Image (cartoon, grey):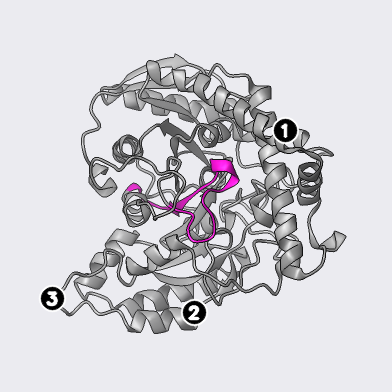
Amino acid sequence: MAFDMCDQARLVRERVVSARELVQAAIERLQAGHELNVLVDEQFEQALDAAGRVDVSSRGPVPVLAGVPFVLKDLGEPQAGRPERMGCRALRHHVAQETAWTVSCYERAGLIICGRTNTPEFGNHCATEPALAGPTLNPWDRRVSPGGSSGGSAVAVAAGLIGGASGGDGTGSIRMPAACCGVVGLKPRRGRSSNAPGAGQSLDGLAVRHALTRTVRDSATLLDVVAREVRGDPYTAPPPIRPFAEAVGADPGRLRIMHAERPPFPGAVDPRVQAVADETARALESAGHDVVPGAAEIDAEAMRSSISVIHAVDNAVTLGWLSDLLGRAPEPDELEPVTWDMARLGLELTAVDHARALDRMHAESRRAARLFDAADVVLAPTLNTLPPAPGALSVSRGSVDAFFDVEFSVTGWTALANATGWAAISLPLGEVDGLPVGVQLIASDEGVLLALAAQLETVMPWSGRRPSAGV
């Protein structure tokens, strides 16, 4: 796709193209990329109808993204009356009864929803290969994973099928596929947008929603669309000092940047991946920032075990919800092995176990926060490795702890940002052996990240770097 979402919106406002023409072109690309297995629910007819109702001729204000095609991750962002399967065979016939508040925000901003993207079962894997819909293929190389859990969304954007797609991130599920597919993936800070109407928080605050895009300004514009609280939310992020879109292109000032010496969890960093992060550090130093080495001083075992408990409890709750919805317990073959591992552990744990896990996670988060006594931003590889092989991060390891040990050995810094609630963004700043490499920036504020990311987009541009299997 030659134009990002902001440019597409401008073309519609200036009547260079109509919204219907823009959506029709997106539908044709999505159809041409069918073999990548991106969509699990096509909404083409509805999208064309919605595009036909877009009116930019009046003198009144035009929604910021009027007429721009978009797709939704099939997890966490339901649409009333549409299938919502969440990658689960037990939900193959499920239809959502309510629309997520974020989806309503997207629609009010003028986005045209064209479909829902493939995701692993309940987002449990950092890979997108559910038994229900089959694997989504990485357009850079089909022998490697596109990552997950927002893998369908990442592939849709990377392959040029669509300008932007929604995602969710609980231990790296936006940034991990962004790195695997060579796109921009921002995880906002905790509480930036709402989980209304269905929930107050997700995964005890680990999980947040946002999007995958080609450009930093698209990510910032989408964040402005959903960056507000809803009455009844249990907590919210402090309001930004200015619209996030205004941070793009703004001078970030002279920042203190900690260049990570090692990941916070056990796992070696591939030297080729580290080299891209090192190159980024040099570029930032040349841009006038103060770059110094450092590391997160946490009890990695305490943090990882706490996250294991939170995921286990969440899956146990999901199992109960699923049983109520079906009017029966799910059959053994209706849930995948990792889901059963987590749900069974969750049912064995006590409320005290859960409370202690939260306390441990928050205690380690406070230890990790000491990083920002001496730094404004942390710079690290998004992943410790190149995109992993299919199956590497989706198989049962016999225990939830062992499962996350393997996952965190690959994803490196991503889960720490979820545990602390910090904002983090993955940028497609390198390529090794024909595969994209992401570099991650972490800070307490999205505005700082977006300004710095936009600066890197200028000095280390990625717009010309595209997968061979793009449309």
Q: Residue 119, image x and y in percent? A: 62, 58
Residue designated by label 1:
353
Secondary structure under tag 2 reads helix
Residue 1 appears in which quarter of the rendering? bottom left
> What crowding class fits label 2: few (fewer than 14 Cα within 10 Å), some (14-19), or many (20 or more)?
many
Residue designated by label 3:
59
Which residue, as the protein is rendered here, is positioned at the far left? 59
Disc on the earlier residue, 3 or 1: 3
**Of the residues tagged 2 and 1, which is closer to the observer?**
1
Which residue range is magenta in the image?
194-216
Disc on the earlier residue, 3 or 2: 2
> What crowding class fits label 1: few (fewer than 14 Cα within 10 Å), some (14-19), or many (20 or more)?
some
Say above or below: 17 vs 305.
below
Specify whether residue 403 is painted magenta: no
| Residue drawn at x 57%, y 23% as measured from the top left | 364
Q: Residue 166, image x and y in percent? A: 48, 58
Secondary structure under tag 1 reads helix
Say above or below: 254 vs 192.
above
Amino acid marked by disc 2: Phe
- Contact (Cβ within 8 Å) of mark 2 with mark 1: no
Give the numbered dot on residue 264.
none
- Contact (Cβ within 8 Å) of mark 3 with mark 1: no
Residue 454 appears in which quarter of the rendering? top left
325, 78: nearer the viewer = 325
**Would residue 372 appear left or right of 386 to someone viewing this image?**
left
Give the spatial CA distance, label 3 vs label 2: 29 Å
| Residue drawn at x 58%, y 19% as measured from the top left | 298
